Image (tube, rainbow, N blue to C red):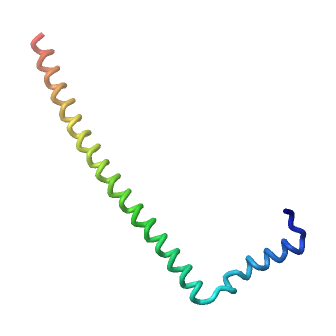
Amino acid sequence: MRLDQSSSLSVLICLHLWPFTMTIHERLDSLVERHQALTQTVEHLALQGEEQNKHLDKILTAREKDGENIRALARIAEIHEHRI
C-alpha cells in the first residue's frame, strides 16, 4: 500500500506530536520501562566486566609463571654452557 502525500504528512504530524498526546501516566510508565531496561543493561555490562577482570587475572598469573619458567631455563642453559 502506497501512502499519498497527505497521508504521509498526517503520519509525520502524528509522530511529531506523539509525546504530547500521551497522558502523564503513559509517559511515566514508558520512562519506568526504559529505566528498567537501562538498569538491566548496566548490570549485564558490570557482570561482563567482572568476568573479563577474572580472566585477565588468570592470564597475568600465567604470564608471570611463564616468565619465571623462562628465566629458570635460561639459568639452566647458562650452567650447561659453562660445563661444555
Residue 84 lies in quadrant: top left
- The residue drawn where x is 18% and y is 25% is 73
Which residue is depicted at the point 15% across and 29% down?
Answer: 72
Residue name at image x 29 percent, y 52 percent: 54
Instruction: Tell which residue pokes out farthest to the front in this image.
Output: 1
**Picture coordinates of residue 74 (x, y %)?**
19, 25
- Closest to the observer, 53 or 37: 37
Relative vertical location of residue 50 with respect to residue 19 in this rendering, above or below: above
Q: Position of residue 37 (x, y in %)?
A: 48, 70
The answer to whether 70 is drawn above or below residue 15 in the figure is: above
Judge from the rendering whether residue 78 lies leftward or rightward of residue 60; answer left or right: left
Instruction: Residue 79 in the image: state x and y as whole percent.
Output: 11, 19
Q: How many marks?
A: 0
- 34 lies above or below 2: below
With 25 as the anchor, is 38 left or right in this view? left
Nearer to me, 61 or 28: 28
The image quarter containing residue 81 is top left
Q: Nearer the viewer, residue 45 or 29?
A: 29
Name the quarter where the N terminus is drawn.
bottom right
- Position in image of residue 19 (x %, y %): 67, 82
Q: Residue furthest bottom?
A: 24
Q: Residue at x 37, y 62 (%)?
A: 46
Is residue 36 depicted above or below 50 in this figure? Answer: below
> For residue 30, which quarter of the picture?
bottom right
Residue that protrudes farthest toward the top in the picture? 84
Report the side of 29 relative to 48 (left or right): right
